[in-house]
Image (cartoon, rainbow, N blue to C red):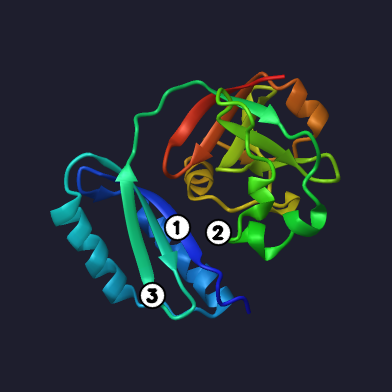
Amino acid sequence: MNTNLEILETLALKDGRWQNWALHWARLQITAQHFRYPLMQMQLESDMERMARQTHSMGDWRVRLALSATGDVQITAEPLPPNAGPVALRLAHRPIANAVAYSDVVRFKTSVRQHYDAFKPQSTGIFDIVLFNEDGQITEGTRGNIAVLLDGRWVTPPLQCGLLPGVGRALALSQGRLIEQVVTLEQARHASGWAFINSLRGWLDARLIA
């Protein structure tokens, strides 16, 4: 096991209220169990309650939880700017290797992000890059999940295509806003709508830039 790996959760704290915490906690538990990391719920929730009530009780914050192999959780926060949309997306210039897309570093949210960093947008006007696997199937963005509008329905790639089970994605699926469907590159290029989704930002209307 790579003991330098940290398990991550990134969520929003808005005016002292944690957003989608139950879903984040459920995912954190699953990931900690997978990597056999100790997770002390009472201590973590005590620290988070103190942050919400005392140090960061006003305003919108981007909060990052980093769980180490020893069970320590580092909590950091920075101001969360307001959403500005629609955001610009661009297709990756090459596929992400299937060996990576179907690996633990994609299925679980961790500090191992080299596979995402390799696709970082090179232009300041691009919000995120849309990844696809070697089978020509859309997977996700480097910062969140992707949805496309096909035949009047919003669809998002299923997990078996190789992507992170994002909290924002799970919420949209549970609300019936999305259905799962394989999205090919050809379908993506002719989609009538795009969206970027994560728990931090929610649902952002998007456009695909050539």
Q: Nearer the viewer, residue 116 or 197?
A: 116
Whether residue 50 is visible here, answered yes or no, is yes
Q: Amino acid at mark 1?
A: Glu
Using the numbered discs, state the Cα–Cα distance from disc 2 to disc 1 in whole angstroms. 7 Å
Q: Residue at x 67, y 20 (%)?
A: 209
Q: Nearer the viewer, mark 2 or mark 3?
A: 3
**Helix, strand, or loop for circle 3?**
loop
Q: Residue furthest left?
A: 54
Q: Amino acid at mark 2?
A: Lys
Q: Between tags 3 and 1, which lies in front?
A: 3
Instruction: Determine whether label 2 and label 1 are within 8 Å by CB.
Output: yes
The reply, left or right, for residue 68 in relation to residue 55 is right
Can you identify the residue that label 2 sits on?
A: 109
Secondary-structure class at tag 1: strand
Q: Residue at x 47, y 33 (%)?
A: 203
The residue singled out by tag 1 in the image is: 9
